[in-house]
Image: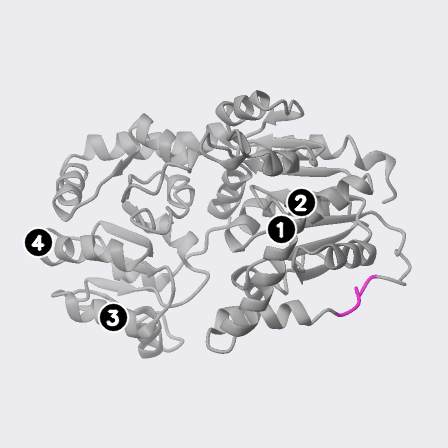
Amino acid sequence: MFAFFYTLSIRFSVFLAHIVALFHPKTRKWVEGQEARGALSFRGDENSNALVVWIHAASLGEFEQGRPVIEALRNDYPQARIVLSFFSPSGYEIRKDYDQVDEVRYLPADTPRNVKRFLDEIRPDVALFIKYEFWYNYLHELKKRQIPTLLFSAIFRPNQLFFKPYGGFYRNMLFCFDKILVQNEASKQLLNSVGYSSVTVAGDTRLDRVVQIAKQAKRYPEIEAFKDTDPLLVIASAWPDDMEVLIPFLNQWDAPLKVIIAPHEINPEQIEQWQKALTKKSERFTVCSLQLGKEVSSLDTLHSPLDILFLDTIGMLASLFRYADFAYVGGAFKDGLHNTMEPAVFGIPIFFGQPYYKKFQEALDLLQLGGATTLSTTQEFTAAFTEVYQQLAIRQQKAAICYDYVQKNAGATAKVMDSLREWLPSRKF
């Protein structure tokens, strides 16, 4: 009965999406992706009997979390065929040409017909889900077909439906996974409390990813010129709620400080509104780049009096933390905290809002250890930032806590691969 109403709700959601797509570009991309299903490119080639690994990521963030596992699979099983699926257009559109996999697809809506057709087409030998994504029909069909299914970098909380007395339908999905690798001991204990025992504490593969990013961080002469000898605050994934707190701080701050603001979504109109609200001189990065042209020897336009730089391009942010002395990570006032590990790996004191950070284990850990600070008002941020800005010893202590946390907790990818090898050696590859 529950399965019937679940599937009915999926079909109704797809129907609504077709209506919303008429005036919502992101939803339109999802609908178009659902309808554009071509044949797999690797069927019929000389390696058509090779091992097939299906990896599903909800969106871009989960992809980055699972990327170290994808690349480890490619390295250890070079002849394998890897199929990567996304639910969200934000993941698919940015990574549809990712060269470490053989196919990138939208995940078809979770109806029995779509599920059977999708699995018949890709014929996976093993299926991997990243962090979450609990699709009833997919999971039950994978179990029915006896396809080993793994969930990794998962994290669970007591308030989730799995652990409620009335959550039997959702609990049932947990038992479709052959193994679940979780981020922390608390998640393991929660799964054990409902009778699920095939669980291992393996940590978060996202830490492995940020370690990779730090090793490969690019240099940007424009940013070096902009920073010059001043301290640099990078505001990452800024939402309007974050800027309501930060703009008054920036307007009243009078000590040497350069600021880079990376909006969560690049919206020129929103950036222009923020620029008008700021009393200090600001500019968009692409405008500065156009002024400079291809020459990086004359970078005066990025020196004082320019105080604030808006990052209006994709792909730079993770490397920019190498130049930062402080980092503010947005999202915690409303949508949910974004990636604090990207600045932490470079050893930077971190600030973020509240209250929507508590489902992120690394944020809780860094707060407890003292490497991060949470706040709710301009006054709280000003006080916390002033202390770290003025007292070098405190800044260095917080920086060391953040760096050490990442280094000590990296290594989850190796544990995921160890679990996969329980199934892969007996498969064709």
Q: Identify residue for label 2.
A: 1
The answer to if 39 sits in the magenta stretch is yes
Which of the numbered marks, if any, corresponds to residue 5?
A: 1
Whether residue 144 sits left or right of residue 217 in the image: it is right
The answer to if 11 sits in the magenta stretch is no
Which quadrant does the C terminus fall into?
Answer: top right
Tags 4 and 2 in contact by the CB under 8 Å rule? no
- State which region is magenta: 38-42
Q: Position of residue 238 (x, y in %)?
A: 31, 56
Decide which of 33, 328 is in the foreground and name it.
33
> Which residue type carries mark 3?
Glu
Label 1 or label 3, whichever comes before in sequence order: 1
Res 300 visible: no
Q: Identify residue for label 4.
A: 254
Tags 2 and 1 in contact by the CB under 8 Å rule? yes
Whether residue 287 sits left or right of residue 43 in the image: it is left
SS label for mark 4: loop
SS label for mark 3: strand
Residues at marks 3 and 4, CA–CA distance in whole angstroms: 19 Å
Which quadrant does the N terminus fall into?
Answer: top right
Q: Closer to the camera: disc 1 or disc 4?
A: 1
Residues at marks 2 and 1, CA–CA distance in whole angstroms: 7 Å
Q: Position of residue 273 (x, y in %)?
A: 22, 71
Residue reaching furthest front? 1
> Which residue type carries mark 2?
Met
Residues at marks 4 and 2, CA–CA distance in whole angstroms: 64 Å
Q: Position of residue 120 (x, y in %)?
A: 83, 55
